[in-house]
Amino acid sequence: MWEWLFDFIEPLDRERIPYAIVGSVAASVYGEPRATNDVDMLILIREADVERLQKAFPEEQFYLPPAEVIRAELKRREGAHLNVIPLETMLKADLYPLSAEEAEWLARRREMRIADRPVWLAAPETVIIHKLRFHREGGSEKHLRDVRGMLAVSGDKLDRGWLDDEILRLGLQNEWNLVQAG
C-alpha cells in the first residue's frame, strides 16, 4: 500500500538529505487513515545542497524544478515548496524546505516502519502545525478533519506545551480554535 513512498525516500536517504513525512500520510499514521495520492515531506537543505537534491532526483527519471527555482524557494522565509514527480509513475511528492527557524522540527522526527522499512515521520505536533498552516492558506476542511483525527487517536501523547508555543509563534490560533470547536 505504501511502497510508492520509497520512490521519494530512497533518493533522499542516498544523498543524506534529512526529511520527515508530514501531511495526510503522517496524519493517517497518527490519526484516522484516509486515502491520498501524494506525500508531503519536510526537507532540510540549503543553497549549497541544490546539486545534491538534483542528483537525488535525476531529470531522466523525475520532474524537479530547475536549480534557479529551487534556490528562489529556499530564500522564502516560510512556505517554500517543491514538487517532485517520478516520470514512470507520475505520483507526486511535495517537498517543503524548512527555514532556519523550523530546522528543530526535524530534530523532533520519529523513525517508524512502513511496509516493514524504516522511514522518518514528523512528530505528531509538527504534522498538526503543518495541517493548520495548510488550512490557513487554502481553507480546506480536510486538514482540520485530519487534525481532529490525530487528536482523537494520539491526543494524549502530544507535547502540548511545544504545540501551544508553536501555534502562538506562527499565529495559528484561529485555525487551532476551529479544530477545538470541532
Image (tube, grey):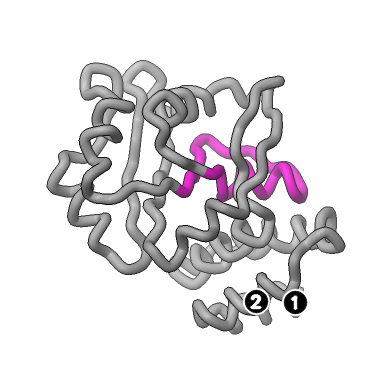
Residue 102 placement (x, y as % from top left): 46, 63
The reply to whether callout 1 and callout 2 are in contact (CB within 8 Å) is yes
Residue 91 placement (x, y as % from top left): 43, 29
Residue 32 placement (x, y as % from top left): 76, 48
Q: How many residues crowd mark 2 within 10 Å: few (<14), some (14–19), many (20+)? A: many
Residue at position x 67%, y 49% from top?
A: 27
- At label 1, the amino acid type is Gln
**Residue 157 occupies which quadrant of the picture?**
bottom right
* Residue 109 located left or right of residue 148: left
Any mark on residue 180, and which? 1
Position above or below: 25 against 167: above
Residue closer to the observer: 154 or 180:
154
Position above or below: 64 against 133: above
Tell me where the magenta segment starts and ends, as one range: 20-42
Question: Residue under circle 2?
Answer: 176
**Residue 28 occupies which quadrant of the picture?**
top right
Asked whether residue 142 is in view, the answer is no
* Residue 153 located left or right of residue 99: right
Cα separation, mark 1 vs mark 2, equals: 6 Å
Asked whether residue 125 is in view, the answer is yes
Residue at position x 69%, y 61% from top?
A: 147
Q: Is residue 21 magenta?
A: yes
Question: From the image, which quarter does the C terminus lie in?
Answer: bottom right
Residue closer to the observer: 179 or 9:
9
Tag 2 secondary structure? helix
Residue at position x 57%, y 67% from top?
A: 132
Q: Is residue 162 magenta?
A: no
- At label 2, the amino acid type is Trp
Residue closer to the observer: 171 or 34:
171
Q: How many residues crowd mark 1 within 10 Å: few (<14), some (14–19), many (20+)? A: few
Residue 46 placement (x, y as % from top left): 29, 50
Residue at position x 43%, y 68% from top?
A: 101
